[in-house]
Image (spheres, helix red, strand yellow):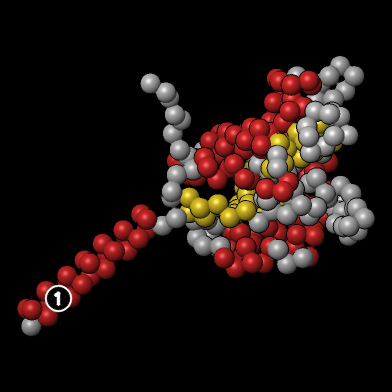
Amino acid sequence: MKTNKLITILTVLIFGFNTSLNAQNKTTTVYLIGDSTMCLYDESRFPQMGWGMPFEYFFNDSVSIENHAKGGRSSRSFIAENRWQPVLDALEEGDYVLIQFGHNDAQNSKDHPDRKTTPEQYKTYISKYISETRSKGAFPVIISPVTRWKFDSEENAVECHEPYLKALKEISKEQKVSLIDLDSKSRNLLDSMGKACSRYLYMYFEPGEYFRFPDGYPDNTHFTEFGARKIAELVLEGIMEQNLDLAHHIIKPYHRK
């Protein structure tokens, strides 16, 4: 009888130890959902990168990044094309969802004729991502759309997504959800670098400047590898400012001795 009791106690202790060990070793998955400024690109598009590409290299092994962002998608079309449901199905307690839409919510295009949303519709879709993420015990983080390379006559970076940034600020306050204002952060970055230097953040090439685009490539929206890294750093800065637990998993800065 005593032997059976001892076995039971040992079994409970071992189970508790294994459970605790598994919890400590659990990888936190961070899902990225958004548009072309965040998404993955293959080598044929080099040097174009979404900021989600270098983003994964800023975390230690306890974090896994799942980049589901897709070019041309809005908060509406990402759901309509069934891109959100697989992410929702995979979510586990303690995971994160970084949500960044707005670029494509402002207008339709030839290839995407039904993606536009009004600011109010935008709030409805963003709210859906937030509530459904929370229903799985995961943490939503909303991110405002990154600015375009656009300046006024005095060479100050211009706000490009005002109605959608306003909507996100309202959602953040109403639903008590973390907001990383990447719109403002990226405009501050452009202003600090100046118009001429900040061009190199973007896929904006003058004629004859880059062999792949002999006639030039005036893209004021998408990022070079340099730009993607700088924008990813702004998102990391936002994560630390919001004091998210995720900040504890960012790798330590390297100081050369």
Judge by depth and name the residue closer to the eye, 121 or 232: 232
Specify whether residue 225 is in view: yes
In the rendered image of this protein, does residue 167 appear above or below residue 29? above
Quadrant of the image occupied by residue 251? top left
Residue at image mark 1: 7
243 vs 216, left or right, is: left
Secondary structure under tag 1 reads helix
* Residue 16 rendering spot, x and y as whole percentages: 27, 64
Quadrant of the image occupied by residue 178? top right
69 vs 207, left or right, is: left
* Residue 94 rendering spot, x and y as whole percentages: 49, 56
In the rendered image of this protein, does residue 199 appear above or below residue 228? above
Amino acid at circle 1:
Ile
Q: Residue at x 78, y 34 (%)?
A: 211
User: Residue reaching furthest top?
Assistant: 154
Q: Residue at x 66, y 37 (%)?
A: 225
In the rendered image of this protein, does residue 135 appear above or below residue 71? below
* Residue 233 rendering spot, x and y as whole percentages: 59, 34
